[in-house]
Amino acid sequence: MEAGRLKVKVTVPPEGGKANKALIELLSKELKVPKSSISIVSGQTSRVKRVLIEDIDFAYLQKKLGVEVEEIS
């Protein structure tokens, strides 16, 4: 976590949405949720993104990330 944000690195170049796809695949694998439950809601072409993860319990998310995060409603 850095300044209230989760910092994630992917090694795929940001060409043609490949890095966004890699980010979704990584989050899906680590959080054990279907890729269809994850979407990038803003920042598709930026390094800073807002990600929506549906159908996941907030406490589970905190546990998987190993951090306390602020719930956004």
Image: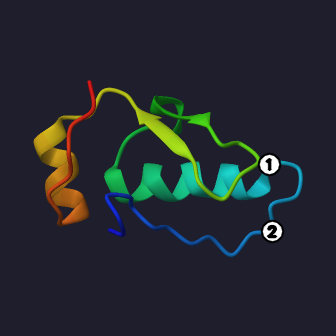
Q: Residue under label 1, please give it.
A: 17
User: Between marks 2 and 1, how big is the CA–CA gap?
Assistant: 9 Å
Residue drawn 25% across the image and 62% down it = 65
Coloring basis for residues: rainbow
Residue sitting nearer the eye, 29 or 50: 50
Residue lying at the far front of the rendered structure: 3
Q: Amino acid at mark 2?
A: Pro
Which image quarter holds the C terminus? Answer: top left
Count residues near mark 2 (Cα–Cα under 10 Å), then give few for <14, some for 14-19, many for 20+.
Answer: few
Using the image, determine if residue 33 lies above or below residue 13. above
Residue lying at the far right of the rendered structure: 16
Circle 2 SS class: loop
Q: Residue under label 2, please give it.
A: 13
Residue drawn 49% across the image and 40% down it = 51
Using the image, determine if residue 28 lies above or below residue 51. below
Q: Amino acid at mark 1?
A: Gly
| Count of numbered badges drawn on the protein | 2
Residue sitting nearer the eye, 35 or 66: 66
Count residues near mark 1 (Cα–Cα under 10 Å), then give few for <14, some for 14-19, many for 20+.
Answer: few
Side of 36 relative to 67 (left or right): right
Residue drawn 65% across the image and 43% down it = 43
